[in-house]
Amino acid sequence: MSPALLTRRSFLARTGTGLVLAGTTSALLPARPAWAAPAKVGEPAPGFTVNATTGSPVSLASYKGKIVVLEWTNHDCPYVRKHYETGNMQGLQRDATGQGVVWLTVISSSEGTQGYVTPPQADELTTSRKAAPTAVLLDTKGVAGKLYGATNTPHMYVVDKAGTLVYAGAIDDRPTSRRADVQGANNYVRAALEAVTAGQPVKTPVTRAYGCTVKYS
């Protein structure tokens, strides 16, 4: 490689063009977007601040020292409806919050897409379905969703008291929209919460989420 080309590459790296020089023989690589490397189990859960339906900002960092569940949802998705129409999701929410767990339901549907709701509509859904989250967050720009790599609804995450992501994936092992499949399913989220509460490692920390795709803008 000519000295002139090396000088040119070094100049680009110094001038902040989004290109980096990785050794004298490597190609120049474009900078990756911030959400290109989603959250990983076993690592600190990415921090975020998203407005709740009340209009108040909710920060994940404010719950340090508590177990947190993140539930990505879309009320029109048949896979989500399966868990709400059977009371499965609400029962899990009540059991968790009754033990001091923080439950954040996150809606990342952008305006004009399936699952998008206004704050009053989201609150009405919480009331009519007798849901029991700590708060419902309206992530219409998809900031939190992309940080976590949320791809489906429902997509579930569990964060331990130290702020480490300890579970990511499906709610259970029955990837269907059939209500009858709730009975007898292995609920991964319940198992993860039981393990974390007992101070034990999560036996199945990563699974493949199933459901409707998250409707990002």
Image: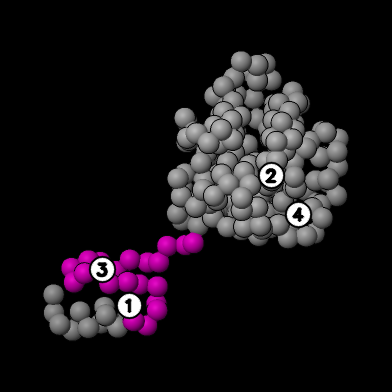
Residue 201: x and y in percent read 47, 35
| Callout 1 touching callout 3 (CB < 8 Å) | no
Report if residue 21 is visible in the image: yes
Give the labeled residue for mark 3: 22
Give the labeled residue for mark 1: 13
Mark closer to the chain start, 3 or 2: 3
Give the labeled residue for mark 4: 52
Give the labeled residue for mark 2: 102
- Within-10-Å neighbours for mark 2: few <14, some 14–19, many 20+: many
Mark closer to the chain start, 3 or 4: 3
Query: Relative to the observer, which residue lies in front, 76 or 65?
Result: 65
Q: CA distance from mark 3 to mark 2?
A: 43 Å
Which quadrant of the view contains residue 141?
Answer: bottom right
Q: Which corner quadrant holds the N terminus?
A: bottom left
Mark closer to the chain start, 2 or 4: 4
Look at the picture and state if 3 lies above or below 177. below
Query: Relative to the observer, which residue lies in front, 186 or 178?
Result: 186
Q: CA distance from mark 2 to mark 1?
A: 44 Å
Report if residue 210 is visible in the image: no
Task: Identify which amino acid the numbered label 1 is placed on.
Answer: Ala
